[in-house]
Amino acid sequence: MGFLLRTFSVVAVASLLLHTLLRYLHLIFEAVGAVTISALFLPILMLIFSNVAIGATPKECIKKLDPNLVKLLEIKFPHLRIPRLADLDQQSINFDIQGGGDGCFVVAEGDFDGDQRQDLAVLLTSISKKDAHLIVALKRGKTWAVHQLPTFCDTIQFCYVKPEKPGTYIRSVALDSPPSRPNERVKLTSKTTSVLSGTLESTGIVYVYSKGRWNYVWVSD
């Protein structure tokens, strides 16, 4: 009986909402005259579904990190801090959530050194600025081996980091000059998860850890 009552309540609420929506559309028809149904329904449906997707609760970046790692980063980089969602581009947060993420696109998890333990990559920002600094923490028992990598994203607001599947990465043909920095390569092959970072909708740099060192290749520019 309780199940039937709950089902009836849901149906009644849905019916009421549908009636309200139809009444709203009827008023619009009367107000604007000849308008196609699709022209009315499409924006409304887009608004409804976008609100549902954006309505997911984003996750603050610090909650994605081990508390011991947070303390270690504070000691090693006292002039830097973990970004807050307020530091990031709001539209990009929404896109990340719609794509199945949690809104914090400056923290990534993966086995970057192939030891079957989950490591972390995080973009830190200055306390007084909005710049970005790429840090990778490799899990070592109860502690972490922390590496600071070359960073090619200026503003934390539009910077990202994420895990990249094992494979071969080749320097983008859009770059018309040869590699000029230490550890920069034309081609890299990785059998483990790598780190992909850069500027949203713009650049991508893959960082590969091998034999105790990091090399990287620009895969998009």
Image: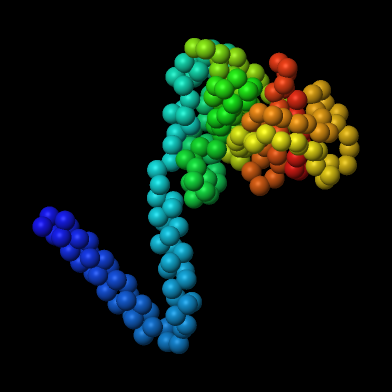
Q: Image quadrant of residue 203?
A: top right
Residue 78 higher or lower than 202, as above or below? above
Q: Which residue is found at the position 23% from the left and 69% from the top? A: 16
Among the 4 quarters of the image, the one containing residue 169:
top right
Q: Horizontal placement of 151 versus 183: left or right? A: left
Q: Residue at x 75, y 36 (%)?
A: 168
Q: Quadrant of the N terminus?
A: bottom left
Q: Residue at x 44, y 62 (%)?
A: 47
In the image shown, does 23 or 10 lie closer to the viewer?
10
Instruction: State the image coordinates of residue 183 (x, y, percent, origin top left).
Output: 79, 24
Say above or below: 203 vs 65. below
Of the pair 88 and 56, the residue shown nearer to us: 56
> Picture coordinates of residue 214 (x, y %)?
72, 22
In this orientation, does residue 155 appear? no
Q: Where does residue 213 sit, x and y in percent of width and height?
A: 73, 18
The mark tally for this picture is: 0
Residue 59 lies in what quarter of the image? top left
Residue occupying the point 52% across, 48% down: 99
Q: Residue furthest left?
A: 1
